[in-house]
Image: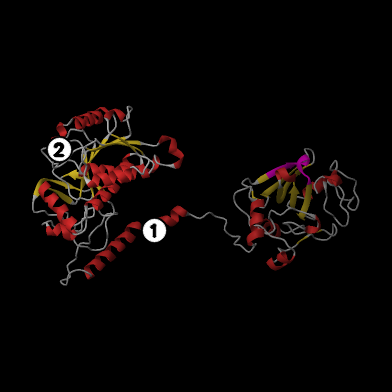
Amino acid sequence: MFFLDAMDAGCRDISPEDCQGWIRPSVSIQALDPKNMAADWLGSLVSINCGPTLGMYQGEVSSVDQTSQTISLRQPFHNGIRCPVPEVTFSAMDIKELKFLDIQSQSGGCKKSACQQALSDPGIMSSGQSGQNGRGGYPAVNLHSNNVPITILQKASPASATNQGLKQPTPKKNGGGGQVKLRDDECFGADMDEGLDTDFDFEGNLALFDKAAVFSQIASTDRNGARSRGTPGGERSTPTRYRHDENILEAKPVVYRQITVSQHGGKEYCTDSGLVVPSVSFELHKRLLAVAEQHGLSLERRLEMTGVCASQMALTLLGGPNRLTPKNDHQRPTVALLCGPHVQGAQGISCGRHLANHDVDVVLFIPNVVKMQESITNELNLYSKTSGKQVASIKDLPVSPVDLVINCLDCHENSLLRDQAWYQAAADWANQNKAPVLTIDPPVSGQKQVVEAKWTLSLGLPLPLDGGEARVYLCDIGVPKQVFQEVGINYHSPFGCKFVIPLHSA
């Protein structure tokens, strides 16, 4: 060790306690001049332990200054990683322990080639913690006497290292990863390629890839494939390009006019998918329902189907699952039903029954008349079994605005009902209420819409309605396709997976 004047025959590893003051009395080499001893250490390979903070350093002794108590190493390694600087100087106060990997002796010392080999050997200059008896990342120093040359033990083979339970970590270029690397080697093994000292050149490798040539080859392959699959004459057929929402399987062209009628109502609508839905005259619509009733689609079935479809639409308008939940039971929606004593009124009563079954507060207005139709009586009887409320006076309707008003006051066959007092009072109440209005089965063109509606719901096929601001919807009441054909209507269902669809003016 530097600053040491004495070295016994065993030349043991020297700890800080052994070198207090750095100069000790000579023991076995008293004849050696202390002034020249520092020069004898030049070129020796040493391992310096500077504690857990500074870590381990190894290198070749380049200079020793006894006055300033410093030692310098050239070509140093820090924790098994080559330092970026060519030389490092240490103070005696920072050194915890020093070990000789090789010492320059008076009999010639170590050869220059042996020193260079020790410095360049990553197995010798590794980051293991130095310990007693030569354990750690460095081979033990075999120092027998001053007159015997110092020998550097060769790098242990992988088999012997495995038997001794030692793992030699692979040196890395960036610092600070010795312990992490040692942990990785303990997990994945030490038999790794230790010669990868340079980083992989990603940019240079990417420059070898000729993107234009590859895409040109792909395009040429596509052209050849298209030509081989083309016409018998060998001409290339242009491949069809599809959008992300189109079916790539070949199919027949879509026919958007799938419904044709014998008696056109004078107005056409279209669905969201573009299918044309023509309107029909009231006479054709009436005849369609009569033929359907002959085949078993009775008035009661149509009333039930209309009530279900209208209630589904009303529930959606009221907010659907965002409004009708058990946690929102204190804010149940309120619907006011305005019905007349006719078939259209019976459709509204059926709708009110289904709404009441879905926890909607329903208030039904229907005037008292001397004689009511049987269909209305049956619907009122079923409605009375629900939680819905029935009133016969406008004064009993809610004073505050309701969530929705459903209008079923008009009758297609009797327009004189509009002159009666109950009709005008109910229409005025609906127009003065701030709630939106849904009209079920509105009257045909020519009859003025007394109640201003936001939505209208037609049955089966739309009637020619007045061009108001109301949005038109169409519901399926279950009329079979063959019934349409019997009345001269070439029909294909436009509903798809729904029972109520919106219609737009064509």
Q: Mark 1 = which residue?
A: 209
- Which span of residues is magenta-colored? 88-96
Q: Is residue 277 visible?
A: yes
Q: What amino acid is found at the position of numbered circle 2 in the picture? A: Gly
Query: Residue 253, how many percent across, how many down?
Result: 18, 59
Q: Tell me the number on the disc at residue 467.
A: 2
Residue with the most extreme bottom position: 232
Quarter of the rendering containing residue 193: bottom right
Query: Residue 178, how many percent across, how many down?
Result: 66, 51
Q: Left or right: where does residue 171 sit relative to residue 358? A: right
Q: Tell me the number on the disc at residue 485.
A: none
- What colouring does the structure picture have? secondary structure
Query: Residue 491, how many percent across, how many down?
Result: 16, 57
Q: Is residue 92 magenta?
A: yes
Q: Does label 1 or label 2 sit earlier along the sequence?
A: 1
The answer to whether 472 is drawn above or below residue 153 in the figure is above
Disc 1, SS: loop
Please name whichever residue, 46 or 112, is drawn nearer the observer in this view of the structure.
Answer: 46
Q: Marks 1/2: CA distance?
A: 65 Å
Q: Left or right: where does residue 349 sit relative to residue 418? A: right
